[in-house]
Amino acid sequence: MPEHENIPPAPVGETFLELGLPAVLTHALDRSGIRAPFPIQAATIPDALAGRDVLGRAPTGSGKTLAFGLPMLVRLKGAASRRGFPRAIVLAPTRELALQIERALDEPALSMGLRVATVVGGIPIKRQVEVLSRGVDLLVATPGRLADHLGQGSVSLDDVAVVTIDEADHMAEMGFLPQVVRILDDTPSGGQRLLFSATLDEEVDSLVQRYLRDPVTHSTAPAADAVPTMRHHLLYVDRDDKYSVVAHIASRSGRTLMFVRTKYGVDRVAGELHAAGVSAGALHGGKTQNNRTRTLASFADGTTPVLIATDVAARGIHVDDISLVVHVDPPTEPKAYLHRAGRTARAGEAGVVVTLVTEDERAAVEQMTRTAGIDVATVKVRPGDRLLADLTGARRPTGKPVPAPDTQAPAQDTPKKGRRAADTGDRPSRRGRAGEVAVRAGSRQGRNRGLDSTPHGRRSRGAH
């Protein structure tokens, strides 16, 4: 969950140095333009530096990457890691998030002579074995791929002094907790554990009870409707008008993220938008890793202004300046609505969330938003309505077909039969295909939010 979603810096006068971080680290942060801690950082860093187990409840965009990452680096300073024996690990549910965490911590680690690397699905395991064999201080990993390395003996967790589990609720939803448990069982029992989760469901709570010792709890999670710059609308549409309305909305100016329930649905919407003259990227677990990489990079740099995604595939992707989130298929649970909505109105920017609702969905969606505590405005719309344009910026599409943005792979690039995407598909998997995500969702405070990623296995200058 890297990081900052309409959450202000800590009170004036409180600095990273005052939180207990060494000067060499604060100077590195300052050079990157990171000068004031966010609330979750101000609350968490002193306890983490003191060696306490920490339970952090904070949403996507709250600044958690530095909240757990900086104290971990301090704990590692002054010693060298044995080859194949990392001294700290961060577990993330998706490879994209893992790579973004690596990028966020790379410069701070560089300043302290430490090495940060990732092991994630979708990248040849042999390459990762080589990186591990050179020695890694802090290893960021997805559970499936780290379990693979443990299984083949290319890494040992015997020296791990501190473990962070990021987005634990997403780990549970994606079915990775058995692998997380195995990994934690392989680390020394006396080590420090930091766990971050937006929610504490039963499975996550069982993880806390089993592995965290007398944890100190910090929470900075606001409800979505508490974000003053975010507006919510239910757009009632006739079923026959739905995809025409989608095309009008997608033709707007600005970065737009659309959520669709299934992989087939994502490809269908993308195909209809291309036929209507709208350039849109499609993201789901059935895409090859190279296809996903190009799609995400194109959306992040603004080349493709529209991204259509399933819930699972979009997790861990944090791109600023998304001014509109569209629930093409309404979510069925309040938690899913809040996760989706959190992609807009970041860093104090304005954002709009709209849900397309057909008559047969109306009662369920209204109940879902009430349960979520969302203050929504409702309106009936049709393609070309002035009100639709006022709410979303919708405009009539050109009607001139455009090719899929990814010209190096088919629009519906799917893996070979029997293969599944690793760690970020629509179901958990421990195997992946070659390729690498390195999305740079640039922003004014990108590094503080942990939004960027680096190529796998980047070696810090000055590392042992």
Image (tube, helix red, strand yellow):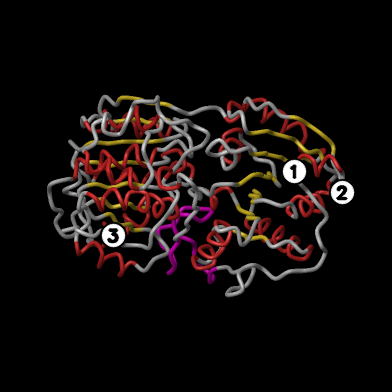
Disc nearer the start of the sequence (2/3): 3
- Which percent across, then down, holds residue 256? 65, 50
Mark 3 nearby-residue class (10 Å; few <14, some 14–19, many ≥20) = some
Q: Main secondary structure of the magenta part?
A: loop
Front position in the image: 383 or 30 = 30
The numbered disc on residue 412 is none
Q: Nearer the viewer's eye, disc 3 or disc 1?
A: 1
Mark 1 nearby-residue class (10 Å; few <14, some 14–19, many ≥20) = many
- Is any part of residue 179 visible from this angle? no
- Which percent across, then down, holds residue 274? 73, 64
Front position in the image: 134 or 358 = 134
C-alpha gap between disc 3 and disc 1: 47 Å
Q: Could you tell me which quadrant the C terminus lies in?
A: bottom left
C-alpha gap between disc 2 and disc 1: 12 Å
- For mark 2, what is the residue? 384
**Amino acid identity at mark 3:** His
User: What range is drawn magenta here?
Assistant: 415-437
Residue lying at 26% horizontally and 65% vertically, measured from the top left: 129
Tell me the SS state at disc 2.
Answer: loop
Count of numbered tags: 3
Tell me the SS state at disc 3.
Answer: helix
- For mark 1, what is the residue? 392
